[in-house]
């Protein structure tokens, strides 16, 4: 039986592992974190992406945990409504907190797949018989194939393809996600506020005592420690300390936040997603950023990769077919997300006014169909292949 190692236990990794196991492969998933990662922003599915959830049999569980989010209201400095961003744009057809989605996928696969938490790959040595893998803690092993599904800062990609700087395209913005008390009283709704070069969106859904905060700011590349939350909080506080609206209260909540996601808006672009017996899937291969449909496409990528490995006579043919199928949608998603930072944090007062007027127009009845088509076109750009015969 073909032995395959998958790096990453968030979303693309467990999905890939599920489909590989369905096709009869022996699968091990290694995850650097000691346990499933919690928190993070909510992720949505729309259009054809719902089909992957149905095929896996997890759609009912995801719908049960759905945020059921409503519209997001664009407000001015005094909190007065100026325009609305419809739920279909921000939350798709079903939206779920990222940590909940990761848990659903893990529980759906843990009885069929071996999971190793608290460890990471330290070296990959390919030869005619497979890939020799060493780990930080576990004993070395040899696998037939290795899949990097370990996110935009992929360790597998760094080991097999080269340093991240060779493939990263900086979009000129930083983003942070954290949770604070819901002092605004939001109920399955959100608000968005911007000043030139900075922006914040707050939402509250399942737990109405808290609200999720997303903060965006324009910046040249920053030097900071990715593991130093205190330093990241200081950067955010410095960038937003003069802002109006509810920002001062949000910053007070940030000081007490236990978890924080902080990163640049960066897209990953590689000429090829595989080398020898090693292949990338999800953000490790094509991170697009907010609005790219990357979560759903990462899951579809895992499905297609496993299906092609089952259907093709060799891994190199399977890798090539997988990339040919997925790359057009990944490119479309990246193009769709290139200006996401500027949407949340327009660079000028004129840009902020322009966003307000655009969404006033797009919310009129003749334009709602166009708006839905625009935000769904990346998700609908790919029809899932049928790998029933391969199975």
Image (tube, grey):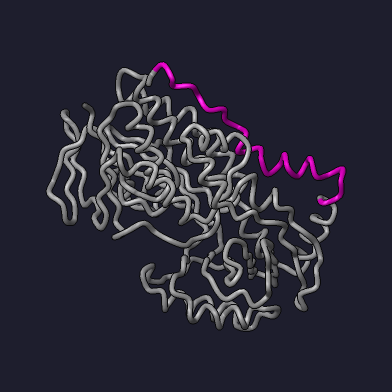
> Which residue range is magenta in the image?
363-389
Measured along the vertical axis of the image, is residue 371 above or below residue 323?
below
User: In the rendered view, does 144 fall on the left or right side of 102?
Assistant: left
Measured along the vertical axis of the image, is residue 322 above or below residue 335?
above
Residue at the image point whose x is 63% and y is 65% from the top: 203
Question: Which of the two residues, 251 or 273, is positioned nearer the viewer here?
Answer: 251
Measured along the vertical axis of the image, is residue 55 above or below residue 243?
above
Q: Is residue 215 visible?
A: no
User: In the rendered view, does 191 fall on the left or right side of 350?
Assistant: left
Residue 385 inside the magenta-drawn segment: yes
User: In the rendered view, does 21 fall on the left or right side of 215?
Assistant: left
Residue at the image point whose x is 58% and y is 52% from the top: 66
* Relative image position of residue 208 (x, y in whole percent): 61, 68
Residue 364 inside the magenta-drawn segment: yes
Quarter location, residue 281: top left
Q: Quadrant of the N terminus?
A: top left
């Amino acid at each position: 039986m073909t032995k395959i190692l998958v790096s990453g236990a968030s979303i693309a990794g467990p999905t890939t592992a599920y489909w590989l196991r369905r096709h009869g492969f022996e699968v091990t998933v290694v995850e650097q974190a000691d346990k499933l990662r919690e928190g993070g922003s909510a992720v949505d599915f729309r259009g054809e992406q719902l089909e992957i959830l149905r095929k896996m049999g997890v759609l009912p569980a995801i719908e049960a945990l759905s945020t059921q989010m409503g519209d997001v209201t664009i407000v001015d400095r005094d909190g007065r409504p100026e325009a609305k961003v419809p739920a279909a744009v921000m939350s798709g057809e079903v939206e779920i907190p990222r940590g909940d989605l990761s848990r659903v996928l893990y529980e759906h696969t843990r009885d069929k797949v071996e999971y190793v938490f608290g460890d990471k790959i330290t070296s990959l040595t390919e030869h005619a018989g497979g890939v020799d893998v060493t780990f930080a803690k576990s004993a070395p092993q040899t696998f037939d194939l290795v899949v990097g599904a370990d996110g935009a800062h992929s360790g597998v990609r760094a080991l097999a393809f080269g340093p991240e700087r060779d493939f990263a395209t900086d979009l000129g913005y930083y983003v942070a996600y954290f949770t604070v008390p819901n002092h605004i009283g939001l109920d399955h709704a959100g608000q968005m506020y911007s000043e030139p070069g900075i922006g914040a969106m707050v939402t509250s859904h399942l737990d109405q005592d808290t609200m999720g905060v997303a903060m965006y700011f324009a910046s040249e590349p920053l030097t900071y420690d990715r593991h130093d939350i205190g330093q990241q909080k200081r950067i955010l506080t410095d960038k937003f300390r003069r802002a109006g609206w509810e920002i001062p209260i949000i910053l007070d909540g940030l000081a007490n936040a236990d978890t924080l996601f902080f990163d640049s808006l960066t897209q990953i672009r590689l000429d090829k997603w595989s080398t020898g017996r090693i292949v990338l899937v999800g953000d490790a291969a094509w991170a697009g950023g907010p609005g790219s449909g990357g979560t759903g496409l990462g899951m579809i990528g895992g499905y297609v990769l496993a299906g092609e490995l089952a259907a093709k006579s060799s891994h190199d043919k399977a890798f090539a077919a997988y990339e040919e199928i997925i790359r057009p949608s990944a490119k479309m998603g990246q193009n769709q997300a290139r200006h996401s930072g500027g949407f949340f944090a327009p660079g000028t007062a004129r840009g902020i006014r322009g966003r307000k007027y655009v969404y006033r127009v797009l919310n009129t009845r003749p334009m709602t169909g166009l708006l839905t088509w625009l935000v769904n076109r990346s998700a609908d750009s790919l029809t899932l292949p049928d790998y029933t015969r391969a199975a």
